[in-house]
Image (spheres, rainbow, N blue to C red):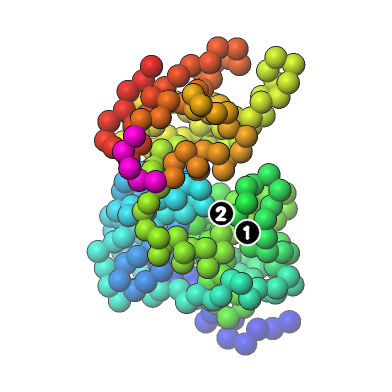
Amino acid sequence: MAIGGFGEIAERLRRSTVLIHGGGRGGGSGVIWTSEGLLVTNSHVARGPHAHVEMWDGRSFKATLTAPDPRRDLAALQISASGLPAGPRADSSQLRPGELVIAIGNPLGFVGALSMGVIHGIGVIRGLGTQSWVQAAVRLAPGNSGGPLADARGQVIGINTMVAGRLALAVPSNAVERFLAAGAEDAWLGVTLYPVHLPRRGAHSFGLLALEIAPGSPAERASILPGDILLGTEEQSFGSVEDLARVLEGGQARLVRFRFLRGDYAHERLVTVQLGGRTAAAA
């Protein structure tokens, strides 16, 4: 079925999408949220306090991380620019399965790549905590993270975040608006994590595998390394990503001792991380 003005819709979305190099390997995408230089992406894309941003017209800017939210995998960035083509937003609570959607991003080095599909569902995904996701049958690849998921009118309905099975998962636009309204309230650890289940003492325990460590982050200052597996704090074990998110709640400075594994499943270690502050020490 042909969509009237689809070429213009796609081009407007491309102009509202940016390429982000946020530290570590590769890059990701982001959305121009306001014409005054506020950008939204995933926290696993913007891994450090600063990022390099490239616009659709070839201009580049240094961006500053203003609000990370690892729980929802969101981050707000600010660049010194005005008059930018911000992406229009739609009310994600009005979405229905079967609606046509468009994803724009920069997968595998292809700038402004477009893919289309339909909404499969909206709601909680088992094993991914209590947050709601826009679930779409649309093709994503590394580099799409942080880019817009839009409806057939080109209005942003979510921020593409990950792939689960054959479905793309996006943070709903209404959740993004709430995140921006709340501001930077939670502490930042600075680790890209992947949930794993470990065979230990005849049972399986839950852990969070550190994939990448953001330069200058509390995790780096505490000497946490890629490959380490966070098991919990001294007081409690992690059973989900939500448990770590609860530890990070609040921006006040405090010391937290994490239990973790390095190199084998038998010997637990402890590391003390200062959250909400500028120093950390290992133990």
- What's the magenta bit mostly, secondary-structure-wise? loop
Vertical order, 197 against 125 (above or below): above
List the residue tagged with mark 1.
Answer: 133
Vertical order, 18 against 234 (above or below): below
Whether residue 157 is visible: yes
Left or right: residue 49 versus residue 202 is left
Q: Residue at x 53, y 71 (%)?
A: 156
**Which quadrant of the rendered structure holds the N terminus?**
bottom right
Q: What range is drawn magenta here? A: 250-254
Amino acid type of the residue tagged 2 in the rendering: Thr
Instruction: From the viewer's side, name the closer residue of 4 and 36.
Output: 36
C-alpha gap between disc 1 and disc 2? 10 Å
Q: Residue at x 30, y 71 (%)?
A: 36
Instruction: From the viewer's side, name the closer residue of 61 and 239.
Output: 239
- Residue 104 location in percent, x, y? 54, 65
**Pointer 1 with pointer 2, Cβ within 8 A:** yes
Q: Residue at x 52, y 63 (%)?
A: 175
Left or right: residue 245 versus residue 116 is left
**Which quadrant of the rendered structure holds the C terminus?**
top left
| Residue 16 belongs to magenta span | no
Left or right: residue 158 versus residue 99 is left
Residue 161: numbered disc: 2
